[in-house]
């Protein structure tokens, strides 16, 4: 979400798109209906994953259906949390994107890369909260006033997450960019490096919003603290890998953006400023020969590089 805001890419021998990159796009009926079916699965999984997460964190992770007890409970729950974080990063690696592309038949793996990634991430999120094995420890549930305040903060954190996803591109984050482009017989348009909206104040607004959601749920248990602690570590340190990719991809443009905008926590000074970042528009980045469909050698044609916006 090689580019992290784009579908997985690789040599034409591995994944051959339905049409040339510069020529007219015309997908077959089978390709279009496969993309449509993938979209239905993707958005169903996305809704289920978000609902499971929202319910689980709001109730202090007492809604899980896992049955593990004792030390196995901690091991199982830890694997659910760690598996989501690790696989999330693996699927965004170059090899991970190529593997995801090869899992899609009919040669549209590259085009529907955002759809595939969003589907797998949503299913992992659903599994983490559905199969969570709840404990029997003490539960802290605030009174009416504190509970109402916490609920308001929890709702505001979800709103912040939506705004951050919107600034990064809802089509990329929710996965509909890929399948809908194939359905409409066109190439996915990934835009450029996000720098407006929430990205003017922090380079990681989605991870920051996710962290706020983890810590604003009103009901607290040992399980809630365990999950919030582990996933907060991932939210803080995991994006370092994405920053390295952006550094190599955008070069001086990303360096200027990095110097101007804090990594994680916004500064109060920037929150009060309405000045946009007019000097960090990403430069055109040439594709490597192996990134062009059907190309094995020669000089690549420069074009705008899609943004690293999947999380």
Image (cartoon, grey):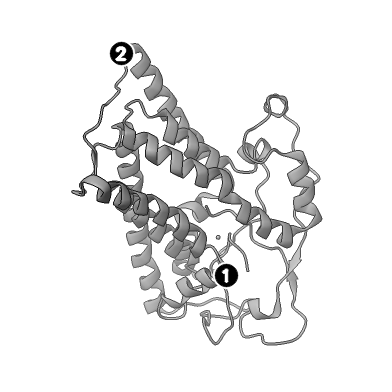
| Residue extending furthest toward the left | 67
Disc marking residue 94:
1
In this view, the residue in front, 145 or 8, is 145
Rendering coords of residue 179 (x, y %): 44, 65
Give above or below for 108 relative to 70: below
The residue to which callout 2 is attached is: 144
Q: Residues within 10 Å of mark 1 (few under 14, many from 20)?
A: some
**Is any atom of residue 184 visible in this view?**
yes
Give above or below for 193 relative to 292: above
Q: Residues within 10 Å of mark 2 (few under 14, many from 20)?
A: few
Give above or below for 96 relative to 28: above
In this view, the residue in front, 144 or 34, is 144
Task: Identify the image quadrant of residue 297.
Answer: bottom right
Among the two numbered marks 1 and 2 on one chain, the one whose residue lies closer to the N terminus: 1
Rendering coords of residue 207 (x, y %): 53, 43
Rendering coords of residue 183 (x, y %): 44, 67
- Measured in 3D between alpha carbons, the distance from the residue under mark 1 to the one under mark 2, in whole angstroms, is 49 Å
Quadrant occupied by the N terminus: bottom right
Secondary element under disc 1, as helix, strand or loop, is: helix
Rendered residue at 58%/61% (across/down): 4
């Amino acid at each position: 979400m090689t580019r992290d805001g784009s579908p997985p890419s690789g040599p034409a021998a591995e994944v051959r798109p339905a049409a040339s990159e510069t020529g007219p796009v015309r997908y077959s009926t089978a390709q279009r209906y496969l993309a449509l079916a993938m979209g239905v699965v993707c958005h169903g999984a996305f809704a289920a994953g978000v609902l499971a997460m929202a319910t689980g964190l709001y109730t202090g992770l007492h809604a899980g259906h896992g049955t593990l007890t004792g030390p196995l409970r901690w091991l199982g729950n830890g694997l659910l949390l760690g598996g989501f974080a690790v696989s999330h990063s693996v699927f965004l690696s170059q090899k991970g994107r190529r593997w995801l592309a090869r899992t899609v038949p009919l040669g549209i793996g590259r085009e529907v890369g955002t759809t595939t990634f969003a589907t797998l991430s949503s299913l992992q999120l659903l599994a983490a909260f559905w199969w969570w094995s709840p404990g029997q420890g003490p539960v802290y549930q605030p009174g009416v006033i504190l509970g109402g305040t916490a609920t308001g903060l929890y709702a505001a954190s979800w709103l912040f997450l939506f705004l951050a996803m919107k600034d990064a591109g809802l089509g990329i984050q929710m996965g509909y960019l890929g399948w809908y482009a194939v359905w409409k017989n066109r190439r996915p348009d990934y835009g450029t490096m996000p720098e407006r909206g929430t990205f003017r104040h922090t380079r990681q607004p989605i991870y920051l919003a996710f962290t706020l959601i983890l810590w604003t749920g009103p009901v607290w248990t040992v399980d809630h603290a365990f999950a919030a602690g582990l996933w907060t570590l991932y939210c803080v340190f995991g994006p370092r890998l994405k920053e390295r990719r952006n550094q190599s991809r955008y070069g001086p443009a990303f360096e200027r953006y990095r110097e101007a905008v804090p990594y994680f926590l916004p500064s109060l000074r920037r929150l009060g400023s309405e000045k946009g970042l007019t000097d960090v528009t990403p430069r055109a980045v040439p594709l490597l020969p192996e990134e062009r469909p059907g190309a094995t050698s020669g000089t690549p044609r420069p074009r705008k590089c899609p943004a690293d916006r999947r999380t």
